[in-house]
Image (cartoon, coloured by chain):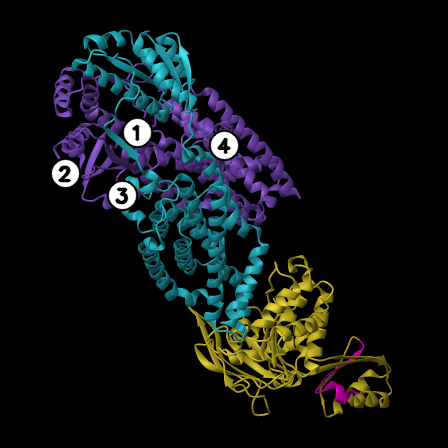
Chain colours: A cyan, B yellow, C purple
Amino acid sequence: MRASLVILGKDLRQRIRDRSALLVAIIVPLVLASIFGLIFHNAITGKVTFTFGLVDQDHGPASRAFATEVLTPLRRQGLIKLHLEPTLAAGRSAADSGKVSAVFVLPAGLSAAGGHGGHSHVQVIGNVDEAIGTQVAQSIAQSFANAIDTLRTVQAAGVSSVATTGGSRLPVPIVLADVSTKRRQLDAGTFYAAGMAVFFVFFTVQFGISSVLEERRDGTLARMLVAPVHRRSVLAGKLLTSLVLGCASMAVLAIATHFLLSAHWGNPVGVAMLIVSGVIAATCVMALVATLARTPDQAQSWQGMVALVLGMLGGAFFPVAQAGGLLAALSLATPQAWFLRGIENMTGGVGPSAVLGPVLAILAFAIITGALAFARVGKLVAP
Amino acid sequence: MSAIRPVDDVIVAGVSAPGPDRPVLDCSNLHKRFGQIEAVRGVSFRIAEGETYGLLGPNGAGKTTTISIACGLLQADAGEVRVCGSPLTTHSVAERAAIGYVPQELAIYPDLNARENLSFFARLYGLSPRQAETRVEEVLATIGLTDRARELTKNYSGGMQRRLNIGIGLLHRPRLLILDEPTVGVDPQSRNAILESVERLADEGMAVLYTTHYMEEADRLCDRIGIVDLGELKAEGTRAELVSLVGEHDQVALEGSGDLSAAARACAEVVAVRTSSINDGAIELIVDHARSVLPELLSVAADAGVAISSVEVTEPDLEAVFLHLTGKALRD
Amino acid sequence: MKVIAIAVTDLRRLLRWRANVFFLFVLPMLIILLLGAAFGGSRQARIGVAGGREDVLAAKFVAALRQRESIDLIRYSSAGSLARAVAHGGVDAGLVIPRDYDARLGRGLGVTIDYFARPDSVAQQLKTTVQSVAADQGRAFAAALLVQRRLGIDYPSALARARAAAARTPAVRVLVTDPGGEPYTSGTGRFQSGASTQLLLFIFLNSLNGAAWIIETRRLGIGRRMLSTPTSVRTVIAGQLLGRLVIALLQALIIVLGSLLFFGVSWGNPIGTAGLICTFSLVGTGAALLIGSLFSSEQQAGPVALLLGLGLAALGGSMAPLEVFPSTARAIAHVTPHAWANDAFSKLLQHHGDIVTILPQLGVLFAFAAGLISVALLQMRRALTA
């Protein structure tokens, strides 16, 4: 054991001096998570501003109501910007050129038709490049249309003193309450912080295990084997290096992203359990790859491949689960996917018991790959 | 695993001190095969305490494989290795404390400095932190790197790196130091320095196993030499024994003025002289043990009336021995 | 020509390594699978519903939802299982209909339906659809409340009148079209351009992998040996560039054809797309050359390549559309080649453009490539001759 710790100490000293270790373990994932956090900042805080156009062909109470009672409050809240377009053609070109995300067109006769119960419509011309903005416009137009509908219904039911204008204080009997944040949905900042951390830890742990191959090439492994230490102590020392580097890296990332990106990793005990099990799994997989490779270069490129494939399948870059079917199933064979599940399970302040399932799945992966690696380890720790 | 204590402090567990009946290293009938190639075929030799033993042979003779087995890096397919009486295998741990190892290729950490390199291995060899500190400074002084100890070894010159390479092998004061062709590709100055250090260590009582394909080194350093080729130990012994084993003889060439033929005939009468002839104005003799018979030859020649102006003695060397034994040159 | 000789030797060395065969060909296949499954065809959005089985009105709500074309509705037995399904991607969004749905509506009280979804654009679009169904279903009740208030009658009578009136009153339709007047297709079911943006990400990332190879060539001293022959540095670099470019193009081709054939992912005008992919691959290769010339250790170049590959892709809108970027991020997006390439793809796919339409973007990409290669040339010369 003592020899393992001596080897761990030497390895850590080398890695701290080695800039590539620092890059992989901390700098790159942090920078990437920050970039993602920057991009999704608005999505996180909900402050996206869309620019819309308005073509008023109606010039009636309905369109006035739309402008003053629907759009103006949104403008005041900073949620939209508005351009008034003089003609339909101008509106079309505004949507086409990208000046606006979408254009509302209130056709002539909208207010009038309400009075006679004729068919009427509201049009949204969407910029094909801005699907989200168009969809928001659709939603706004839809709620306006609903208000008109309700008022016309009320009129048809015999209440004549209600003007067919856009609704103010109309009752909404069926309310849709968006409880996404309360129901275990990861916000983008946390998703990318956790995703990048778990993706890169598979590269970080390589420094411990693959160094066996490098030392073999450089002759220092032979020196260690000639010394009065057990071979298993040498292996243990290297494994410990991977574990220490991996856990340290993820801990630093968790703390840094918590402050820099408002990433909510969740209950610290749960996070710690996920990190430790994830690092163990990563070490076991990379150890297995190292036992299969013959030279350090081969080990490095194979390990890179495995880390990339597992990371992609595990959903560290885009949610694979939404693909359904075979891919979603394959995704569950990766420790990354279970790690992210564990973090998801803890959103909204759920306690560490929520991670027990994922931790067990991750450890199962670790045991299987670890056993395979162990069977071959004799070849690894040999001169 | 209990702590291994350094050899000079206390008798290492299970490994007794060497004695006349207990050589430092005892290899018997080692065999090692790699696939189709038999790298080591029945090699046996012993090294007594304080003895410098050389393994002399060309590239590919199996020297490196043999010493890999001797230090427990490789497991022999057959045969046994004993270090100070205790068997040594790849699983042995305690027995390794008696061995110091200097590999042919540099085996040092380029991104650590000399002191860190030495401390690491000192700790691996079981020295406590304090013992390690003292010993590291001693070794640094021995190899002359104290001033540069804080620089990363990747910035060292080749010679400095070699010195460190050797220094690591000495940290734990081993009973036996194994050096695998330490002077290959080394400039003459550093080479000489290395040879001198080995001589010094031998003088201090360390047993040394030294492999080389340079005859001069084997000649200079080794008490006994084992000649290996194609995995076999062809012959072993002191230099003189080897030379005589193959029946090579010394040559003596005497130049001078006077009646050379008379002197030649007179010399031929001397017991140790095998042949005598005249060539190019010099008397050429083949003798046993030129050194011992030379005074007699000189006086015989003088009696015959020849004034000797120059004496040239050519002793058969190990290259000749090797050639005789294997039919090949030692170096190609 | 020397350039071709260098390129061919480079490729030959590359293909001897089995690991590279994986990187070059198997990995793109995997990417196709992922892209195709995630973005191919026109998959319907999936919404899960829990509760509301017993009540008549609730069932009507669910039926109305089911009738919407863009939705695939799946029933769940409990809110808990539904929540898990949404969290793990089994469905895109979930609705929980409360037990007293009918009771409350019948009494003129409001009803709250919990909605939760993944934070992506598909889910947000689902919300719009569900809200419109909710508004439609609730119209009679809203009217009834107003009628009750104005006419001062009891709620059940008001509700009866309102229902009758609602049946007589046609709803106002909301038409969503593109500037050409066609129905808006950009957002049906899935975010279609996701395939193209992800393609750009992978082309760039794969190209950057070449940086490590270039460093190894230099480390082995081969570069210097090449220079000791009467070959200019420019030729050496052109040869390496050509080799890497061929590989990048091959990979892109595999991804495009594979996803088209197996998953029906559409790529727009073929010539335009081909031109865009070639130009963008040139940019990626130039970046790889630059990294290869700046770093002397593969171990350092690797993480930097990952950083650039993923970071630039994200900043350029390859992971999430530029629409949702805050203004600062949106302003700097066009510092990346990805943003320009995404613009070009958008013109090809959404605006049905061709190669002429995207000439400006191609021009900018060429400029990127030229810039990267020039700096790489300078740096490589310095590195090789030092």
Range of residues picked out in magenta: B281-294
Secondary structure at numbered mark 4: helix
Q: Residue at x 34, y 54 (%)?
A: A355
Badge 4: chain ID = C
Alpha-carbon span between mark 2 and mark 3: 18 Å
Q: Amino acid at mark 1?
A: Gln
Numbered disc in front, either 4 or 3 = 3
Alpha-carbon span between mark 1 and mark 3: 19 Å
Q: Which residue is mark 3?
A: C83
Alpha-carbon span between mark 4 and mark 1: 35 Å
* Residues marked 2 and 1 touching at CB (< 8 Å): no
Please rate how many residues cluster around mark 2, counting C-alpha atoms within 10 Å: few if below 14, some from 14 to 19, many from 20: some
Q: Amino acid at mark 3?
A: Ala
Q: Earlier in the sequence, mark 1 or mark 3?
A: 3
Q: Amino acid at mark 2?
A: Arg
Alpha-carbon span between mark 4 and mark 3: 44 Å
Q: Which residue is mark 4?
A: C283
Residue B317 at least partly seen: no
Residue C294, above or below A170: below
Q: Earlier in the sequence, mark 2 or mark 3?
A: 2
Mark identifier at residue A280 = none
Q: Earlier in the sequence, mark 4 or mark 1?
A: 1
Drawn side of residue B19 relative to residue B254, left or right: left
Q: Which residue is mark 1?
A: C125
Mark identifier at residue C53 = 2
What x and y, as percent, mark residue C142?
Answer: 21, 23
Numbered disc in front, either 1 or 3 = 3
Numbered disc in front, either 2 or 3 = 2
Q: Earlier in the sequence, mark 4 or mark 3?
A: 3
Numbered disc in front, either 2 or 1 = 2
